Amino acid sequence: MPAVERIDPKTIFSAEEWARLTARDSWRGMWLVVHCWGTIAAAVALVTLWPNPFTWLLAVMIVGTRQLGLAILMHEAAHGGLHTNQKINEFVGNWICAVPVGATLAGYRTYHLKHHRFTQQPEDPDLGLSAPFPISKDSFYRKAFRDLTGQTFIKQRRPSFKALFARHDPVLTDAMRDEETENFLTSGRIAMQRFLAVNALLFGLFWLAGAGIWFFGVWIVAMATWFPLVTRVRNIAEHACTSTGPDPFSHARTTHANIIERALIAPYWVNYHAEHHLFMYLPCYRLEEAHRLLTEKGLIQRVDVAAGYLDVLRLATSRARPASAA
């Protein structure tokens, strides 16, 4: 199918408005990265100074959300939005944001730009994240249980872990592997090696700070539990139950987020996803203003806007349970 239609911003915004929306602030981009890691450090400090079940649970939720925050800032770097200097943007986006949570900026950018080109179309590589919805509440609860018990984490990391120990076998390659398989194994091996190396460095930093136990008790536990859950909720909110029709205003959802949702589910303006799809090279810190301008111009009615994440989950889990399962 052809790529989705693109909106010409000149037909919506004045030259002054568009210049303001597209202005990139490298210092602000770097501050977001510092803020993300600073929040992680503060959460670990909290449980280190006052270790109890409540501070531990709060730290896991905060750190898991900021691990999503690192992925969001990697996404920002994929669009060149963290820093105007390309080398700094690439280094910070990859090594400071992507690798610590098991991703790579280059690999992410390749498939993500295809997602933008074919949003909600058969060629969209993210279509599998939204196509099954709505689902039943029972189905969602099962998925959430797998997230919170580490099953999703293990399932997602297993291929890269296996690739780490895969060895090049000329006979096997000639007989059974094609070039695509070899590239997959190589990229998976490199990604896992970098992930383990950076996390070993993080463990050293935790240990030097007197919080070595919390590298496993908070950082790893958060990555294996809360991070997969909020990533799932984010994916649902962005495209589940949105239109596959020709209007690009309807392909993604914006979700209003209160202060608790921003702290524990949707950091760094990720909730303004429709605005991001309409104008994908806007820095994330300009998306709220883009939303305001679209509202003022009477165009926000074409966008699926949810009042909050609970409303999105109600919609996404609105499929009735089969009678046989009742």
Image: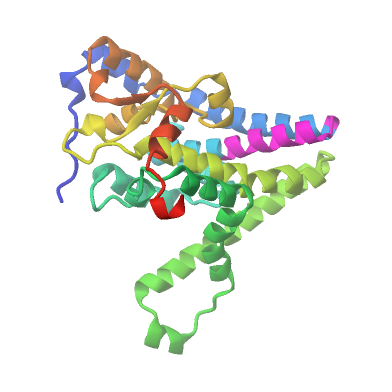
Q: Quadrant of residue 38?
A: top right
The residue drawn where x is 27% and y is 43% is 119
Where residue 153 appears, as percent x and y from the top left, is: 58, 54
When the figure is inspected, residue 304 is found, relative to residue 93, above or below; the finding is above
The residue drawn where x is 53% and y is 25% is 262
Magenta stretch holds residue 159: no
Q: Nearer the viewer, residue 107 or 158?
A: 158
Q: Is residue 45 visible?
A: no
Where residue 17 appears, as percent x and y from the top left, is: 28, 13
Count of marks placed on residues: 0
Span shown in magenta: 49-67
By secondary structure, the bulk of the magenta-drawn segment is best described as helix
Magenta stretch holds residue 66: yes
**Side of 309 relative to 319 (left or right):** right
Where residue 115 appears, as percent x and y from the top left, is: 31, 46
Q: Nearer the viewer, residue 309 or 228?
A: 309
Q: Nearer the viewer, residue 300 or 83?
A: 300
Q: Residue furthest top?
A: 296
**Side of 231 relative to 214 (left or right):** left
Colouring mode (rainbow / by chain / secondary structure / one colour): rainbow
The residue drawn where x is 27% and y is 19% is 300
The residue drawn where x is 32% and y is 29% is 274
Q: Quadrant of residue 86?
A: top left
Where residue 175 appears, as percent x and y from the top left, is: 38, 88
